[in-house]
Amino acid sequence: MVKATVIGAAGGIGQPLSLLLKQNTLITDLALYDVVNSPGVAADISHINTPSVVKGYLPPDGGLEKALKGADIVVIPAGVPRKPGMTRDDLFNINASIVRDIAVGIAAHAPKAFVLVISNPVNSTVPICAEVLKKKGVYDPKRLFGVTTLDVVRASTFVAEAAGQPTDSLKFKIPVIGGHSGVTIVPLLSQTSPSVSLDQSTVESLTNRIQFGGDEVVKAKDGAGSATLSMAFAGARFASAVLEAASGKGSSQPEYAYVDLTSESGGKEVASAIGASPAYFSVPVTLGPNGVEKIHGLGKVNDYEQGLIKKAVEDLDGNISKGVSFVESSKL
Ligand SMILES: NC(=O)c1ccc[n+]([C@@H]2O[C@H](COP(=O)([O-])OP(=O)(O)OC[C@H]3O[C@@H](n4cnc5c(N)ncnc54)[C@H](O)[C@@H]3O)[C@@H](O)[C@H]2O)c1
Ligand SMILES: O=C(O)C[C@H](O)C(=O)O
């Protein structure tokens, strides 16, 4: 039996993500929680003839507790998205308390669950979750992930286009490390596999496009939000990888996620390779039955990429301490 809970299930990401999770045959119970409309989304999705039993929950009558109770994996796309002209950090004032309160619920009702944080700013909301779980005495760093899969998905699409092979995007693997916001997103294009020959000006424009891919969607949606469908795809893909690894059928291919660098062996080496020690960083990880099983090294990084990492670390440190201080000053 595997119970998956989506918090923010009626939103732009939450609905298609719930639909994609309904197609995951490892899941037997799918709990959809939101502050609005979740019963309708659940009723709709529940008619699909895949194994999971779907239930929708609202806040009254302990809806959050019921949705979380016994969850093996909790995916969190709750909170407000950007509008044109905003940075992800501009969402902090609203989303920080939403994520904090959800984390309090997780600590009480699903302390052993894998927690996948999608809500922005991910660079800060993951530390917020961690600090709450620490305060409640249930923090397991191997089980907490900031979902950065969309950056990896975008990188392979954009590189395939630049290589003149747009229909082959699935075959291009590009490590994307750092955080999930502007210059904190660091694609390591020199490690593209299979290798492609790109001149430096193409490398720089591709890097910029991957770093600011989210802005492309925010601009195109013109006030109606940010990426939802591609994010649902990416979130479902990462959730599947976590669940497959938990079931003992994990892939040997690493996944990229924003994790606590102290969570596993390998994290210290990454910190020393980037010449700093941000507490959280998106890194290649092998997943196993208990979450993060191994943090991999970053491979050969060229001078241009070292420069990108340096800028990323400067921003990340501030984003992380902002999240940590927020929980320190919260009454829990
Ligand atoms: N990590 C990433 O790569 C990535 C990608 C895209 C979007 N995002 C972020 O995901 C978040 C959601 O985006 P969206 O487009 O789905 O927004 P949305 O406004 O369409 O949906 C958010 C949902 O969260 C619900 N919600 C609000 N407060 C809640 C609470 N306390 N408990 C439960 N549900 C609550 C809302 O009712 C709404 O249904 C945003 O913060 C956005 O920036 C992250
Ligand atoms: O850009 C955003 O605000 C949403 C998301 O983080 C993205 O990368 O698309």
Image (tube, rainbow, N blue to C red):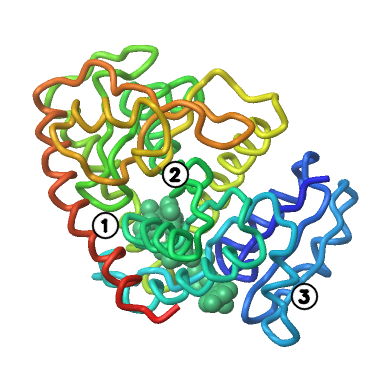
Which residue position is annotated with label 2?
150
Q: Position of residue 199 (x, y in %)?
A: 15, 20
Indicate the amino acid at tag 1.
Answer: Ile
Position of residue 319 measured from the top left corner of the image (x, y, whole percent): 24, 59
Q: In which image quadrant can residue 119 be found?
A: bottom left
- Residue type marked 3: Gly
**Mark on residue 7?**
none
Q: Secondary structure at mark 1?
A: helix
Q: Is residue 21 above or below residue 54?
A: above
Q: Which residue ends up furthest to the front in the rendered image?
A: 137
Residue closest to the eye, 10 or 280: 280
Identity, as a three-letter code, of the amino acid under mark 2: Leu
Depth check: 151 or 246 in front? Answer: 246
Tell me: 194 left or right of 255. left
Q: Nearer the viewer, mark 1 or mark 3?
A: 1
Gap between marks 3 and 2 measured at Cα = 27 Å
The residue carrying mark 2 has its beta carbon less than 8 Å from ligand 1: yes
Distance Cα–Cα, label 2 vs label 1: 20 Å
- The residue to which callout 3 is attached is 40
Marked residue nearer the N-terminal end (3 or 2): 3
Assess whether mark 1 and mark 2 are in contact (beta carbons under 8 angstroms): no
- Whereabouts is ligand 2, in terms of quadrant? bottom left
In the rendered view, tell whether residue 142 sits above or below residue 166: below
Q: Who's the residue at 22% across and 16% down the image?
A: 300
**Label 2 or label 1, whichever comes before in sequence order:** 2
Residue under pointer 1: 320
- Percent x, y of residue 231: 50, 51
Q: Is residue 278 left or right of residue 174?
A: left
Q: Helix, strand, or loop for circle 3?
A: helix
